[in-house]
Image (tube, rainbow, N blue to C red):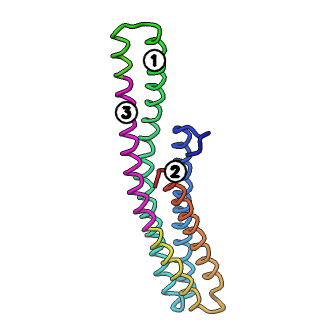
Amino acid sequence: MPASQTPLRQVVGLREEIKTINSIAFQVNLLGLNAILLAKQFGEVARGFGVISAELRAFSKQLASHMQAIAQRSVNLVSLETQRLCVHKRHALLCRAQGRSTTDWLAQARQRQQDMLSHLQAEREDTFKHMREHLDEAYHTCLFGTVIARSARIEAAYAGNQGMVLTTTSLDFSARVDQVLASLDRLKQATGG
């Protein structure tokens, strides 16, 4: 995380990246539906392309499922970071007050706030750990999506010259999957993976 970026801003950035991937998964799903319809128009020569397109739709749904799990963890992160900011402010105030007074209750209150900060940090790390696990699963799913998208290009070639629209659609699949892979890489970096 860059020095100028606060943990709360980092979480907001994570959530934006998750939305981007969800949007792409939705686009792949629509492309897959459109590709199935195109394959039906081309008939027997594009039957394999239709099957591959159905697999890409299944891929998009699986990817969306992974992103849903990650998004739920990111909601937890927003809550944790908000709590951490509040506790940190209280802790800082108690530290300043303790410098002006020697009462035991201030030291005890400061220690409770420090313990709470440690607990929140441990929860944050655990949440990031679970996010990285889901990201790894999404990444493997996406690698499989890359294979399916390449297969779509091969199947589009079987349609010959009349299947140019299928080739264009298969290239769209590949481009979308590549976008997801790039976004997943950014998410992995942002979560410490």
Between marks 2 and 3 in the image, the one whose residue lies nearer the viewer: 3
Locate residue 52 relative to residue 16 in the image: left or right: left
Q: Nearer the viewer, residue 52 or 183?
A: 183
The CA span between labels 2 and 3 is 21 Å
Residue at figure coordinates x 43%, y 52% from the top left: 70
Whole-percent x, y for residue 184 in the image: 51, 60
Q: Are marks 1 and 3 in contact (CB under 8 Å)?
A: no
Structural crowding at the residue carrying mark 1, measured as other residues with C-alpha within 10 Å and reported as few (<14), some (14–19) or many (≥20): some
Between marks 2 and 1 in the image, the one whose residue lies nearer the viewer: 1
- Counting residues from the start of the chain, the first of labels 2 and 3 encountered is 3
Q: Is residue 134 above or below residue 164?
A: above
The residue identified by callout 2 is: 190
Q: Are marks 2 and 1 in contact (CB under 8 Å)?
A: no
The dominant secondary structure in magenta is helix
In the image, what residue type sits under mark 2? Ala
Magenta range: 113-140
The residue identified by callout 1 is: 95
Residue at figure coordinates x 55%, y 52% from the top left: 17
Q: Are marks 2 and 3 in contact (CB under 8 Å)?
A: no
The residue identified by callout 3 is: 118
The CA span between labels 2 and 1 is 31 Å
